[in-house]
Amino acid sequence: MATMVNGQKRVGLAADRRHSFYGRDIVSVKQFSREDLTYIFGVANEMRSIVRRVGTTDLLKGYVLANLFYEPSTRTSSSFIAAMVRLGGSVIPIHGVQYSSVSKGESLPDTIRTLESYADVIVLRHPEVGASEVAARYASKPVISAGDGVGEHPTQGLLDLYTIYSELGTIDGLHVAMVGDLKNGRTVHSLARLLRLYDTTLTMVSPDILRLPEENKQELIAAGRTVHETDSVDDVIESADVLYVTRVQKERFADLREYEAVKDCYEITPALMARAKERMALMHPLPRVGEIHYDVDDDPRAAYFRQMENGMYIRMALLAAVLGKA
Amino acid sequence: MATMVNGQKRVGLAADRRHSFYGRDIVSVKQFSREDLTYIFGVANEMRSIVRRVGTTDLLKGYVLANLFYEPSTRTSSSFIAAMVRLGGSVIPIHGVQYSSVSKGESLPDTIRTLESYADVIVLRHPEVGASEVAARYASKPVISAGDGVGEHPTQGLLDLYTIYSELGTIDGLHVAMVGDLKNGRTVHSLARLLRLYDTTLTMVSPDILRLPEENKQELIAAGRTVHETDSVDDVIESADVLYVTRVQKERFADLREYEAVKDCYEITPALMARAKERMALMHPLPRVGEIHYDVDDDPRAAYFRQMENGMYIRMALLAAVLGKA
Amino acid sequence: MATMVNGQKRVGLAADRRHSFYGRDIVSVKQFSREDLTYIFGVANEMRSIVRRVGTTDLLKGYVLANLFYEPSTRTSSSFIAAMVRLGGSVIPIHGVQYSSVSKGESLPDTIRTLESYADVIVLRHPEVGASEVAARYASKPVISAGDGVGEHPTQGLLDLYTIYSELGTIDGLHVAMVGDLKNGRTVHSLARLLRLYDTTLTMVSPDILRLPEENKQELIAAGRTVHETDSVDDVIESADVLYVTRVQKERFADLREYEAVKDCYEITPALMARAKERMALMHPLPRVGEIHYDVDDDPRAAYFRQMENGMYIRMALLAAVLGKA
């Protein structure tokens, strides 16, 4: 992934396990060990403490982030900007870039090599799977993926896992239920991939046509996890420690009657929450469009806005870590 | 408007009259008393003094502004960014956001609750009337309206009033003439609403079809103000202390001959200014398209560029005030 | 170009030759003397040293840049933002502005006079030739052109010349070959205009239909420079100290067979570089689309990414200089 240039990048992602993220790229959740995660969650905890006490720090004073978004994502781009400025660093916002094919415009490697001559770290959102790995290969400065196509969205996976850890104090031993479109949701795939490192039981709740891909399921089983599948939230609402809800999109169904038949099973209401554990976390990557009723927002178990906030702490931790300042 | 969350918002807007803006939302000119205005103008004076002496201050170091614009407004968004960075704070610029209906995209409350997990204060420009009040209701951090639809544009009203005060040293006792499209101009409505708090005489100068709405007129009369109406600038040029000019848009006229007949009455020329008081203020919210001749720009009474500059000081004052740092 | 306002602008561009850029506009490469260039390159050297040692400085703390781009240019706008934040200053990014004709929207002078009430220096990119000079005439704060139409792009010319100086330690005595579309490339015109101040030999390498305009050629000859012309890179590859390559665009050719016939002569390959001098600089303003083979990137003589980096140092030097802080 990374080449050794100016001493700014370490070779390989798994090479140094002494919790040193210095100079590493963040392009896939696959690159993390449990030790890495424990380390980064510890740094994120410190970041939360700094923000709550004094708002910002000067840890990254003198550092510049190139925030390169080839497709719009207000939530993610804002989160990275907030993370960088709260660390005392500066941001070059490059949003609304038209994605032009290689034949007409500049190649991604050339863009990356130009930007790294201005900046110290690059965050990249790109519509094509694998773009972050390409960028990381050519860059001598650290590259952090902010999602590429239907591929990876590693910082989302990290913030989701960190939210479980923050809300419930542990990850081992939990029953995590994932609800909704488990076939297409990349946040589900990233989180599941991270959860395989922990002693968890997983229940996948989805309509039949939106089930978790077999490949992802086998990955969990190979890691020794127990995976249940069902099409009804009723089956998990009383036992789940974590309910991770995603959107079921009408347009995925060929037959609208099929959609009408299932959609209500996937709306989390106050009545449903009344049956859930007293201590559990209701999560959603947002945006939501009806999957969680607004009346649930005031429930102390509704963790989705804290989840957003955690995104900033995780990104602060990653930025500080890859720049060797954590 | 505001709910009590983390001690960051005060309950209600008129509750605390001891000039404390701390934690308040700024969503309507209606919320201000004369005491509020005197206070904020005093802070704006200090801001001007700081900028002229040293450029910036560290008053808001550690604070982050989410500058959320659902429609473009270079002037207003730039003014808020300049205000925040001159206070030592940082900005998350969220411009060019496509406004998507609630049915397809995320609800405004969810967007606001996400952004307030990253930022300390939110500035919102939105095409729909009432959007700022909705945002303020859901946010636990202060929300400042940067204009919503044909509704309010409170910071524009404040900067206009502050410019009158800065140019002429007082507001009581003045004759203020408003010229142009008084029917559709929200800046006119906001300024008139603020002027009702002062002992002023107002003359409304407009073509018949673009007269001030009856509601706004009655509001002024109910407050004890004298309101004259005319269709000719000639009637006010010699007596006005303030000439507040707005654009008369051709497209408002069904009959173009009607437009041709009136438009020249509404162009401020050096010849017209020669008849005006020696001490008066010629104002315009900008952009202008022919309402004020370029040759007037060098006239010391031409206040419109100072008006722009005042916008930055007013916004600095508001940001510092709602964050409890004024 | 500049008018005296608030002591912030010096009268004229060539008036003060004691290397004082303070308050000057940067709108044309024509405005520079050799002494000016020596001075600004010295400041750029210091900027490089600062960035490499500590990343940023507080030299422009308290200063605000309005970065006004009427047409997109990721590379140039990012470079100016990076330059300003590495100097400790702040940026108002105004990108994606729709260019609207004077009849429909606001005049450029009004926009400039508004922005200078918020900012201390304005960078302007505009699609119309001469726009920067207009802006400079109306602004009391310094204006730096970031390119206007097919006209000038002075900071590109400066960074190109600075790269030659950095790579080879001198400019006098060099043989500079310019390759590609010499007719339409404004970077070629700007660099050639600067090179006329130095004791250089120039060879212009282009297809017949893309030759350097006669006017530019005569300017070089009038300055005492020797100018050769050829249509083949073969003629210069062994003797050139600098190979400045630009894109030959297919769409410039009426007859595509003509394009096919010449295009390969203008691709710089490792085989071609094997015949070049051991100490020389291969440059390109980027983006490239095939003019330089990717396999050349690792050649130590490939200077184009260092050229990008130099752009940041030159812009840092200019910003500091016009604000009187160099």
Image (cartoon, coloured by chain):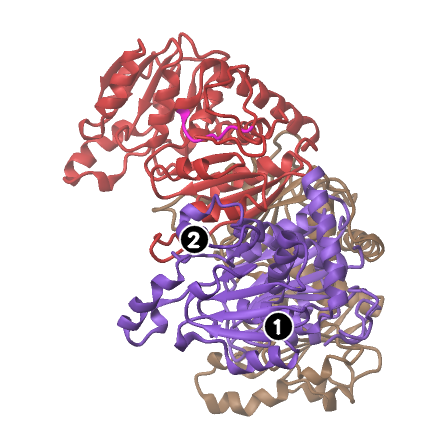
Chain colours: A brown, B purple, C red
What is the C-alpha distance between the residues marked 2 and 1? 47 Å
Q: Quadrant of residue B189?
A: bottom right
* Residue at disc 1, secondary structure: helix
Quarter in which the C terminus of chain A is drawn: top right
Q: Quadrant of residue B13?
A: bottom right
Which disc number belongs to residue B193?
1
> What amino acid does circle 2 point to?
Tyr
* Residue at disc 2, secondary structure: loop
Report the span colored magenta: C23-29
Which secondary structure is most common in the magenta stretch?
Answer: loop
| Residue depicted at x 62% and y 72% | B193
Q: Nearer the viewer, residue B215 or A42?
A: B215
Q: What is the chain letter for disc 2? A: A
Image x and y of residue A9, in percent: 65, 36
| Residue depicted at x 34% and y 27% | C188
Residue located beneath label 2 in the image: A99
Q: Is residue C24 magenta?
A: yes
Are there few (<14), some (14-19), or many (20+) residues within 10 Å of tag 1?
some
| Residue depicted at x 60% and y 60% | B160
Q: What is the chain letter for disc 1? A: B
